[in-house]
Amino acid sequence: MKRLLRVALCLLLACYAGQSVWAGTETLVVGVSSDIHTLDPGVSSDNYDWRQIYPCYDRLVRYKVMDGKGSTEVEPSAAESWEVSPDGLIWTFRIREGITFADGTKLDAEAVRFSLQRTLDIGKGPADNIGAIDVMRVIDPMTLEITLKNPYGPFLQTLATNGASIINPKIMQHAKDNDLAQAWLAGNMDGSGPFRMVEWLRGQRFVLEANKDYWGGAPALDRVIIRFMPESADRRMALERGDIDIAENVLIDQIPALEQNPEISVERHASQLVEYVYINTQKDKLKDKQVRQALSYAVDYQGIIDFVLQGNGVQMRGPVPLGMWGHKPDVFQYTRDVDKAKALLKDAGAEGLELTLIYSERRPSWEQIATIMQANFAQIGVKLNLQLLANPTLRDQVDKGDFELCLGAWSPDFADPYMFMNFWFDSGLWGLPGNRSFYQNEQVDALIREAAAKADVAERTRLYHQAQDVIMEDAPYIFLYQVQTIVPLHKNVHGYVFNPMLESMYNFESITKN
Amino acid sequence: MKLPGRFLMTLLLYVLRRLAYMAPVLLGVTVLAFLISHAIPGDPAQLIAGPKASRETVENIRRTHGLDQPLPAQYWRFLHGLSQGDLGVSIRSHRPVLEDIRDYLPATLELTLASLLLCLGLGIPLGILAAVKRNTVVDHLTRVFSVIGVSTPVFWLGLMLLLVFYRHLGWLPGSGRLDVTMAAPLRITGMYTVDALLAGDWQALRNAASHLLLPAFCLSYVYLAIITRIVRSSMIAVLGQDYIVTARANGLSEARVVLKHAFKNSLIPTVTIVGLSFGELMGGAILTETIFSWPGMGKYVVDSVNYLDFPAIMGFTLMVSLAYVCVNLAVDVLYAAINPTIRY
């Protein structure tokens, strides 16, 4: 027995690890909340995957950084320059010389054509973003001509999305059963970006190594380690101990404590992520816009922002969020007005209304928002039943229109108001594809479709602004708030640039550590 | 212990018979798991396609994964694959489910075995001690220890362990299976401690073991408490038997009486509980795995359910049922080995 005890004690002592594990100034460690699923740019529709994929590939264009801040405008990247025909249909890209993949293969027009065509042929989520492409033609080794199905305003922006990443065509040697090398690319990468994949230990970590020969200049960091840590408190503790440099998605209630820590800075950035309530405009009383307006007047927007988000958000003003062009700063905004809401309900003959709000556990804030809305609605005489559903079930019901009210979140894939205006209000996109309030207004349809087909930003802005006035009057959604992304990081990390278009993604190529 | 040859023969036949019964049990499990997972309303194609996908894209994915086929056809396809040792391709990770299991199962197994080791290594001595020192301070202390164990929520315990031993004292490393800067040992079993031991890589062993300690304790505490209580009560029952009095009267040392004569006869209930605990530890480690960023099956399967990743759900269910059935069989065989009056 004594011997056993001694052995156990020795083992315990052997386990004693003492000091924390500091990775050094050449290695950046990021603690993130979720493991990833696939590395195939043609397959993934998930920002968490893109976080790893994006720095390993080049795209024709990239988001500009202006004064150290990420913007929604794009600039040349693998494409040196481009021209567009007057009708906006034919785009001719001149590819930059001197970009190579890891094996020395040249990045040329054919590689771009191959990559975009592959994403289109796979036909999964990313294909929708570049779905405007009709045909592509390699004019000479460094010139690619893309013809669109119809003029499409946001086209250039869609080329900055993850699905438009340029892949080495040689991956086709790994193709099996006509899968366009999907099986191989799910766990491997072959790009020309500033980083290369070294290791992916599933559920544990993902390691990237700097591509010292990168055409845009070698990154300052040698290595980036992404640690998968599902528990928020765990990420917070690791950040405080200095084991990780950046902690992602730390719960709001833990932020004030981090702000007290002199070694940590907490950055807040206006994101393009919005939360809103779909009102099913095809359901009984909800068909009446006065009822929808009444519901919009009933909600205590500021209360939700102060209490649920602890001030880390701003009320939405119209469907296009602040920071995206096309945002209309003077569009009508609903604020809490119980009397007006009651009067509207009375006019509509909808007193004593009973509604059901569905939501899932996908976002931790929803339970609280639902409860606040229940209390808000009770004050205008509307009984709100709350129904918590599993995420797949919720999505199924939303797609079928089998609901009255539903809590939702949305973030744009590319920097264009199209992501809000056309997705949310086009009557051809009812259900999950985007128009989740099953809204139909011919005037709005005409305006947003015209805006999508034009290239001139001023003209498009005018059309979108016009549509927004109609939409706010119709109140098909309750526009809650625009979320602030909170990024706690160590003070020895410099050069981090938040880009609202690249949520959960990092500019590893320009981050330094001292 | 000596076992008669004839007994071994009948035992072998019994084991073979039980193994034959396993097939219909597992088949039943697959039918149930298949029906239940498909009863959840929802469409995995929509989930994979992403939140903004068009109808054509969703339809395309549905077709690629065979989700547009009628349920019996889908089930038949699963069975057909299974008969060839193929569990299908995960909808979420786009890899064969077997490969996913190969990646995630060893972590769970390592955690489970370490927890079990802690349960037995601490639970049995504590239980014996409490029984022998019945109604003394020692007994009361173990009771308090057990009551705390049974009533402490795992997520709270896990966070407290990290807060105290990692954040404040810095005695033990934080979450994960290894330090980020350390390479994983050469894969043999996939269990880092075992692989490091086999490779003679002491640094990796030390690192992996230190990472294992907190999650293993966190996971084991409830079962540790239960085992302590079970061992105590069955020991008390046995210690009151006539043959123990006789043994003592014959002048045997107390240690010999307790450890050899009493303990062995009190083992049956303990073995039963250990068998059950093993199955539960395997399937129920999700909270511990989440808190300690332990990349095991628990987290994998919860994510799979959220994504309605049918092949992954089926693969996991099958794997855990197999473990359950095997452990139950092992427990039944152990009964016979422990107690000669039990024969099959």
Image: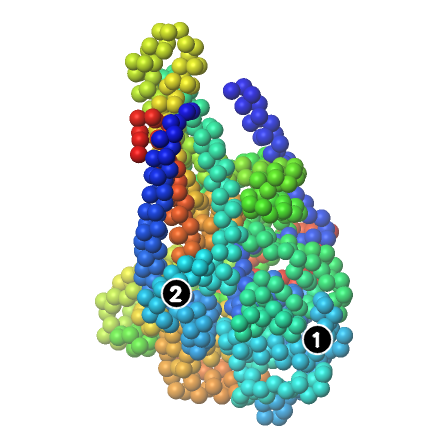
Q: Chain of mark 2?
A: B
Residue at the spot of label 1: A107
Q: Position of residue A28 (x, y in %)?
A: 67, 53
Residue closest to the eye, A421 or B114: B114
Can you say whether A386 is above or below B229 in the image?
A: below
Have a look at marks 2 and 1 and say if they share a chain: no
Can you say whether B21 is above or below B273 in the image?
A: below
**Figure quadrant of residue B145:** top left
The span from disc 2 to disc 1 (Cα, nearest Å) is: 42 Å
Residue at the spot of label 2: B77
Can you say whether A130 is above or below B72 in the image?
A: below
**Figure quadrant of residue A352:** bottom left
Q: Secondary structure at mark 2?
A: helix
In this picture, residue A435 sits left or right of residue A244: left
Q: Chain of mark 1?
A: A
Q: Identify which residue is drawn at 58% across, 40% down.
A: B193
Q: Identify which residue is drawn at 68% across, 81% down.
A: A109
Amino acid bearing label 1: Leu
